[in-house]
Image (spheres, coloured by chain):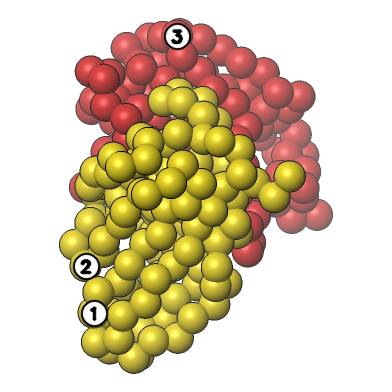
Amino acid sequence: NAGVTQTPKFQVLKTGQSMTLQCAQDMNHEYMSWYRQDPGMGLRLIHYSVGAGITDQGEVPNGYNVSRSTTEDFPLRLLSAAPSQTSVYFCASRLSRVTEAFFGQGTRLTVV
Amino acid sequence: TQLLEQSPQFLSIQEGENLTVYCNSSSVFSSLQWYRQEPGEGPVLLVTVVTGGEVKKLKRLTFQFGDARKDSSLHITAAQPGDTGLYLCAGILTGGGNKLTFGTGTQLKVEL
């Protein structure tokens, strides 16, 4: 049982480049979320989804897009990378609204 | 300002000491969770509390949900080096929201 799988683990981008962070889960969870983690700020919610075809914004959505075409996959797109998007990104899934969140191992992104 | 503020931000103690970490908000939560995160990994759930005033114990860890469901605390008795890590509270607001919001985090280091 793989759980939540994120790729890549590390990425360096130049300012202005675009890229997609991949997230897949094999637990048939309806709820999926993307967070970024910066020192001293815990985890901040970027976007989330409560099922295929349904997405909504979190606390820090600017500069990021998401889509949810299947239950399993929830990719995060950076449209035009900026140094302020240098961070560690975590994808999480949970079965329902108040159940445990399972996390991927994270993607460390550096924008130069 | 983030919805969930944790204190202290950093804590460095000796093995055997007791400590308390606080998670505070001005908003009411339907449930509160505590996670622990180790370097290079995603957070892992420790406990979920759902009732105001609820106390849960997990070996040497005691978790309490405030009566008004606006705050929570984590108390560790006789800390051990294996308790070292980043502790994060997370909650879902009352009123039907689906966002799982995380606190600012407390970095704990327990030394021999």
In the displayed structure, B53 sits above or below B109; it is: above
Name the residue located 23 percent from the left edge and 18 percent from the top edge. B95
To which residue does mark 3 refer? Answer: B51
In the displayed structure, B47 sits above or below A78; it is: above
Label 2 neighbourhood size at 10 Å, few (<14), some (14-19), many (20+)? Answer: few
Q: Earlier in the sequence, mark 1 or mark 2?
A: 2
Name the residue located 57 percent from the left edge and 72 percent from the top edge. A9
Horizontal side of A90 relative to A41 (left or right) equals right
To which residue does mark 2 refer? Answer: A63
Q: Position of residue A28 (x, y in %)?
A: 56, 36
Q: Position of residue A31 (x, y in %)?
A: 43, 36
Q: Is residue B2 visible?
A: no
- The number of numbered badges drawn on the structure is 3
Q: Which chain is yellow?
A: A
Residue at the outermost right position: B112
Q: Colour of chain B?
A: red
Q: Nearer the viewer, mark 2 or mark 3?
A: 2
To which residue does mark 1 refer? Answer: A80
Q: Pointers 2 and 3 in contact (CB under 8 A)?
A: no
Q: Pointers 1 and 2 in contact (CB under 8 A)?
A: yes
Q: State the separation of the CA atoms marked 1 and 2.
A: 7 Å
